[in-house]
Image (tube, rainbow, N blue to C red):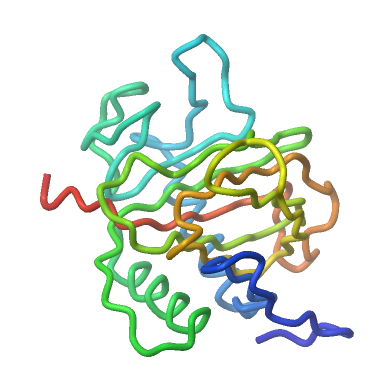
Amino acid sequence: MSAELFPRPVAEVAPGAVHVPAWLDPELQRRLLDACRAWARPPAGLRTVRMPGGGEMTARQVCLGWHWYPYGYARTVVDGDGAPVKPFPGWLGDLARQAVAHAYGDGPCTAPYDIALVNHYGAGARMGLHRDSDERSDAPVVSFSLGDSCVFRFGNTETRGRPWTDVELRSGDLFVFGRESRAAYHGVPRTHPGTAPPELGLTGRINITLRVSGLGSG
């Protein structure tokens, strides 16, 4: 969906884990970025996540639909300003289902996506290897990248150690992981500052991760 000089192929990184380069066209990237900027405003806006051991995540985060905190979900920002979490927009769920159907190529996806975690990576930010395991659904996780490119490390389901595969994610890329890889460890060991498309007007990297909570209406 973009005019890269040397188009990158779709790749199955592991069973059920699919990288689709340049899936978001420039117009859709701008629409998502505009939405992210609105979601980042308080109340229930962009925050620094503090871990139970006292450490802080270097990527800052805002949530939609359900508020994620280590290690659970709530309807309010329990580890921040206490405001109700921002609503999850229906159009974003539609986009997630389209992404899954495209990545897997096996017909319409009907999963009821209801969570978005929006992470902003500034200079030097990273994300350690972790699993998305606080949901009650095993529906595929959908990831959109905007801005700076990064190294996305996709591991195995048993350990944070090897084997893993490092994938370069650029602005507009889609990554879907489900099925056998739904519980795989993954993270971002580094970003590449200054690599965002100039026309996007974004400093740093934004990752939009979409999930199905399986928590019902809450």
Task: Judge from the rendering whether residue 188 lies leftward or rightward of residue 186; answer left or right.
Answer: right
The relative height of residue 112 versus residue 102 in the rendered view (above or below) is above
Return the residue nearer the eye: 11 or 20.
Answer: 11
Residue at left 75%, top 59%? 167
Tell me the quarter of the image containing the C terminus: top left
| Direction from residue 208 to residue 82 in the image, left or right | left
Q: Residue at x 52, y 66 (%)?
A: 176
Quadrant in which the N terminus is drawn: bottom right
Q: Quadrant of residue 75?
A: top left
Residue 132 in percent (x, y) is at: 44, 44
**Of residues 73 and 38, the one drawn nearer to the viewer in this rendering:** 73
Identify the residue at image location x=64%, y=28%. 58
User: Percent from the top left, x then y, of residue 147?
Assistant: 70, 58
Left or right: 149 in relation to 139: right
Quadrant for residue 5, please give it.
bottom right
Considering every residue shown, the one lying at the far left of the view is 217
142, above or below 160, in the image? below
Count of number-bearing discs = 0
> x%, y% of residue 194?
85, 51
Residue placed furthest toward the right: 5
Residue at the (76%, 54%) spot, across then down: 166
Place residue 197 in its image quadrant: bottom right
